[in-house]
Each structure stands twice: as C-alpha cells, then as structure tokens.
Image (tube, rainbow, N blue to C red):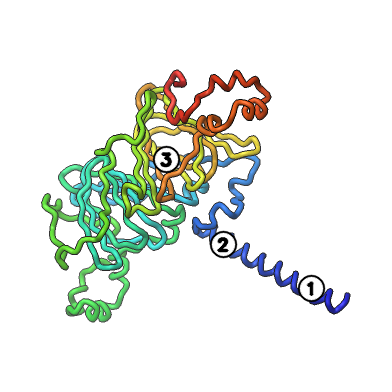
Amino acid sequence: MTQFGRRDFLSVAASVGAVSTWALARTQEAEGGNSTFMNNVPDPLLADKELPTFKFSLDKSVGKVIGGSSGKEATVLQLPISKGIAGVSMILEPGAMRELHWHATAAEWAFVLSGRVRTSVIDPQGNAEINDFGPGDVWYFPRGHGHMLECLGHESCHFILIFDNGYFSEFGTFSVSDWIGHVPKSLLAKNFGVPESSFNDFPKEEVYFARGAVPPDNQPIPLQNKKLPAQTHKYELLSQSPHATFKGGREWRVDSTRFPISTTITGVILDLEPGGLRELHWHPTADEWQYVIDGNISVTMFGSHGRYRTEELERGDVGYIPQGYGHSIENIGLKPCRVLIGFNTGVYAGIDLSQWLAGNSLDVLATNFSKPATLFEKFPHKDVFIADQEGH
C-alpha cells in the first residue's frame, strides 16, 4: 500500500468509526425516548414480518390504588409499541390529591371525563396558576413544571392524562414528599428557615395520593399572592363548536394554534355514529394515542409490505398508531362512540386517503391501478374525513 493509500484508508476508517458512533448514540437516544430521532432509527418491534399489537386494556389493568383513588398507566412497559406517548387513567376520591410533583421527561396533557378537578402549577419564572376544571376541559403542563391535582366537591373525578414520551414513568415522576422525606432535617431547616423539629412528622416515603378535607369551592390564594403566567394552562374543549361535523360523526380538536401553551401535544375528541368511519389516513408528524371513552371501535393499521392488523377496542381500552402508519377508526357498535385521541405534536397534521386520491388526475389513478378512468370519476372529489354507514 502506498503512503497516500494508507492515509486514505485511515481517513475512511476514522469516518466510518465516527458514523458508527453517531448512529449508536442516536439509537440509544431513540430507545431512551428522544422523539427527535424516534422515527429515524429502525424500530425492531416494527420491523418484523407481522405488526405487533397496538391495543392495551388500560382501565382493566391493576395500576396503583390508594383508598378510593387510582392511577392506571399505559407506557412502553404495558404497550411496547407506544414509545412516543404514554397515558394514565386517574380517579381521585373526594378530599384526595395527586400530590405536588413534576415530570422530568414529559409534558402532561389532560382531559376531564367526570367530576371536578382543581390544579395548581408553577413555571420557572415563579408564575403560578390555580384552575378549576369540569367534564370536557383540558389542561397542559410543560415538561418539568411543578403541579398538583385535587378532587373538588363530594363526588369522585376521573380524567385521562397524556404524556409526550412513552418512557416517562420509567424515568420517574418527582414527588415533593419523596424529596423532602429523604433530605436531612438540618438542610431542610436551613432551606425554609424553620426549626428542624418542624419536619419530625413529615412522610418518609412518597405519598402519591394525599387525603384530607374536601377543598373549599372558592379558589385559595397562593402564599406568594397572585402572580399569573402569560399563558393559561386551561382550555374548555367541549365548550367550543366541533372542528368538523359530518353525517357519520364529528370532531373537536385543540392544538397550539388555539391553546398556545400546548406546544407538544394535540388533543381530539372523535364522535362516530353507528357504522361511522374516520377514514383511512396517516399523520406525517406525530404518533397517535387513542382512549375509548364510550362504545366499541375497530382500528386498522397498515405498516407497508403487506402488513396489516385490526384490533377491536372497547370502553377503557387504549390504541396506538406510530407516526406515518396508515389507519382508520370505525364504530362497530349499535350506539354512538366517543374516542379521545392524543398526538405528540403541537400542530395537527394529517393526510386522508380520499383527499390524496382526489389530488391526482384521472389518468394517474387509471395507470396506478390498471382500471378505467371512468371508475375514478365516481370516487370523492374532496376529502371525506368521516364517512357514515352508507359510505357518504
């Protein structure tokens, strides 16, 4: 080998090594839940000849139960395909509080199903907001913002939490009781300017669900007095007009264009009449997480190379569609159904199959499918979005 050849070889070898190191790092980041690279690295779970299950019976799972309060989660541990989004079904009994905590690796979006909830949240600028929520309302807490959730009134509340990282629970939720319970009393006394004895009876382990008296109906004033953030954490989703209404169903949608603080999660409520179909479509910029509020649905998923899977979901079940995978949602029950859908993006984006075909000329469609152009004249000339039982 010539001197030039050896230098060239060493240069190439160094470049290959650098690329390999970069690829390994990106793979590890993807496996660790970094959504920036999640879909740039092949997922072994989705590379098999058959598509994996994308269904999990969330409300039938065991979860965490303390008294009359419970939290049941769907993360990658329970549903391995759901690497981009995790969810929790939570019930708080009267007088119960999901204690002060923060999520180091995920933002939190929530939809209230029943009952009333009060939240408090603080941002890095020291601004704090207290809000009360009822059925149909939404909240959003950015990643790392400290918050709490408590039941209002004398009836239990039930809400669904959506997180923009399927691994969030594995990485940890940081609770205030767990932190203070493991800090030396001398350090706590110095931190808060009170005697060490003040912390004698504090919990030594994480409380998770704290229980006390039913909160007052009037919102209390924070110790620091009111210091509100520039953007509210509350949005009254079902108080708005539906985003889209069709004979076969309707949809409410909220993303950051309507709820500015919600920069990483978009939420949808989808109602379908019996036989109604949210048509075949895909989302080019986000994964889709589904929770069945009521009814029975059939969800299909297309994964390329002839791979196709159908799952039937009922009330309390969760479905998950990875970014870019074709899918549909159909009401197969005898009554209307309602589905909560979350996307790990701040701005909604979707492409429907009917709209895609309508965006092409007759000769292109005829050539693509080896069928007469007259057949495609009968196809929709615009987006269908939701079809009714008759296919209209």
> What residue occupies the far right of the structure in this picture?
1
Q: Is residue 85 above or below residue 292?
A: below
Expressed as whole percent of the image width and height from the top left, the position of residue 4 reads 83, 76
Earlier residue among tags 3 and 1: 1
CA gap, disc 3 and disc 1: 53 Å
Toward the viewer: 58 or 101?
A: 101
Closest to the camera, between mark 3 and mark 1, is 1
Q: Residues within 10 Å of mark 1 (few under 14, many from 20)?
A: few
> Is 292 placed left or right of 77 in the picture?
left
Residue type beneath disc 2: Gln
Circle 3 residue: 290
Question: Which quadrant would residue 134 be assigned to in this image?
Answer: top left
Q: Nearer the viewer, mark 2 or mark 1?
A: 1
Locate the N terminus by quadrant: bottom right
In the image, taking residue 61 as reference, residue 99 lies left or right, namely left
* 107 to the left or right of 2: left
Q: Residue 121 falls in which quadrant of the image? A: bottom left
Q: Residue at x 59, y 48 (%)?
A: 45
Q: Residue 281 placed where, x, y %?
A: 50, 35
Q: Position of residue 30 (x, y in %)?
A: 54, 58
Residue 8, label in figure:
1
For the point 66% across and 29% down, the residue is 368
Task: Tell me if 282 is positioned left or right of 17 in this view.
Answer: left
Q: Find disc 2 in the rendering and name its residue.
A: 28
Is 222 situated above or below 282? below
Q: Quadrant of the C terminus?
A: top left
Q: Is residue 96 visible?
A: no
Residue type of the residue flagged with mark 3: Gln
Amino acid type, label 1: Asp
Q: Residues within 10 Å of mark 2 (few under 14, many from 20)?
A: some
